[in-house]
Image (tube, rainbow, N blue to C red):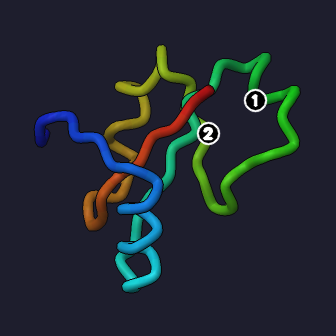
Amino acid sequence: MADDQRITVDELRKRLDAGEPFLFLDTRNPKAWGESDVKVPGAIRVPVGHFEDYLAELPKDRPIVTYCT
């Protein structure tokens, strides 16, 4: 697996506008996720403590962006 990398919102926006596909993982805790009305369309909900349980199921053909609060 590649080293962890950070991307700014502006850089992500540029790359999305250029048509680059990303996979978004919502790693917020269950309470924060349940109380929020803001969710990225198409994001996969993966609790951060269970990330490794989902690795085999995640597409390998695009960069993954994780986010939390």
- Against 64, residue 34 (above or below) is above
Residue 35: x and y, percent?
87, 27
Q: Mark 2: few, some, or many residues within 10 Å (few <14, many ≥20)?
A: some
Query: Of helix, strand and loop, which one carries label 2?
Result: strand
Residue type at numbered disc 2: Arg
Q: Residue furthest bottom?
A: 18
Location of the N terminus by quadrant is top left
* Viewer-side label of 2, 1: 1
- Against 31, residue 10 (above or below) is below
- Against 7, residue 46 (above or below) is above
Q: Mark 1: few, some, or many residues within 10 Å (few <14, many ≥20)?
A: some
Query: Of helix, strand and loop, which one carries label 1?
Result: helix
Q: Residue furthest left?
A: 2
Front-lying residue, 57 or 40: 40
Of callouts 2 and 1, the N-terminal one: 1
Location of the C terminus by quadrant is top right
Residue type at numbered disc 1: Trp
The image quarter containing residue 12 is bottom left
The image quarter containing residue 62 is bottom left
- Residue beneath label 1, please? 33
The image quarter containing residue 26 is top right
Number of numbered discs present?
2
- Residue beneath label 2, please? 45
**CB atoms at circles 2 and 1 under 8 Å apart?**
yes
